[in-house]
Amino acid sequence: MTKIKSVRTRVWNWTGPTVPPTGNFCTNASDLLYDKGDAMSSFRFHQWLTCEIETEDGTIGIGNAALAPSVVKAAIDEWFAPLVIGEDPFDYAYLWEKMYRRSHAWGRKGIGMIAISAVDLAIWDLMGKLANKPVFKLLGGRTKEKIPVYYSKLYSGPIDVMQAEAAEAQKYGYSAYKMRFGWGPKDGKAGMRENLKRVEAVREVIGYDTDLMLECYMGWNLDYAKRMLPKLVKYEPRWLEEPVIADDVDGYRELNAMNIVPISGGEHEFSIIGCKDLIEKKAVSVLQYDTNRVGGITAAQKINAIAEAHQVPVIPHAGQMHNYHLTMANANCMISEYFPVFDVEVGNELFYYVFEGDPDAVDGFIDLDDNTPGLGIEISDKHLKHFEITE
């Protein structure tokens, strides 16, 4: 069996055009601070990391990371790459434990787990290519003919602009939509009214036969969320996402226990055990780990099993191919998030500029090819003029 020969990381710094932020674009964890300028700036990422793992026979697996790429690059180059070079990529469980346990003193949350995730994704892509099978086949195969996806954008802005965006998205057959809130605790009751106006306005366009998800992105606190939840009930949200900061598990549990709007979260959790705690404490009705933060596909499959045993549905954060393969192979992952191809704004859109191979949504669904090995993505050379690449 061919062994891992090298690990190459690159940071892709976007220098091309961007969509400037607008006021009340999206609430976030920095909103509670007294701060001048763009409170969303620390959550806007215009860099991406690629991790290419090559075996002795020349096969290359591709992983990636979106958060703090330059720091993650250092962690992989200096710490994790030496742990996997010379190893058999099909020993993925051993390699995951080796990376996790040998960095446990400093790496089990945040940067360390993001780095492990990028390496693990590359290993799964590599295994698929070596076996000449798509990753979802290695995970157990299809559990659904096609994957239903929900339209994920609708950032808070002028009401007429949000309604126009929702109306345009309807043309593509989506059966679910996610919108963002723009006001939080510091904005008082007037801000509450602005939030509610936008939920009502979007519902006016999409009606009540489609699902509507509501995103706070950690920009509220427990008191504010408890006041808002009863006001949201009449709009029949499928869930309220990340209403409080990620560490406030008891806050999530209290909101979920109100049992009037399902609470979702987990995007900013970084471990199998952390996700287990969210599930066992009944803190979320929908779990939304991020595969390239929580430890990659190896960790995600363990989390999926825990969630299924507790009958908590899993809908991984963001689109992207690694999440689609997990969703295809797990019956408990019912739908996927889908960011439409768009000019670079928050940064999620960069995936389409760094890689090629992601499926386009058709009539509200995406599909994966049974005959494309690995994850099905390649690094693109189409937008090189808009990137500065750090080796």
Image: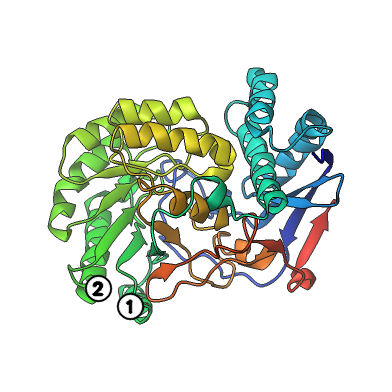
Point 62% across, 69% down: residue = 18
Across the whole image, how many numbered discs are drawn on residues? 2
Tag 1 residue = 170
Q: Specify whether residue 63 is in view.
A: no
Q: Residue at x 62, y 39 (%)?
A: 117
Q: Amino acid at mark 1?
A: Gln
On the question of residue 193 being in view, the answer is yes
The N terminus: image quadrant: top right
Amino acid type, mark 2? Ile
State the residue in front, 223 or 73.
73
- As drawn, is 116 to the left or to the right of 320? right
Secondary structure at badge 2 equals: helix
Seen in the picture, residue 252 relative to 36 is either above or below; the reply is above
The answer to whether 183 appears left or right of 25 in the picture is: left
Colouring mode (rainbow / by chain / secondary structure / one colour): rainbow
The percent position of residue 229, horizontal first and vertical second, equals: 19, 46
Could you say where residue 212 lies in the image, as x and y percent from the top left?
27, 61
Q: Determine the image quadrant of residue 194.
A: bottom left
Locate residue 222: give its quadrant.
top left
Identify the residue under disc 2.
Answer: 206
Q: Nearer the viewer, residue 157 or 352?
A: 352
SS for dot 1 = helix
**Residue 163: x %, y % from top left:** 31, 76
Q: Is residue 158 above or below residue 123?
A: below
Q: Residues within 10 Å of mark 1 (few under 14, many from 20)?
A: some
Mark 1 and mark 2 residues within 8 Å of each other at the beta carbon: yes
Q: Is residue 358 left or right of residue 222?
A: right
- Give the class, few, some or many, for how many residues have Cα within 10 Å of label 2's Cα (few <14, many ≥20): many
Q: Position of residue 82 (x, y in %)?
A: 82, 30
Q: Residue at x 19, y 33 (%)?
A: 257
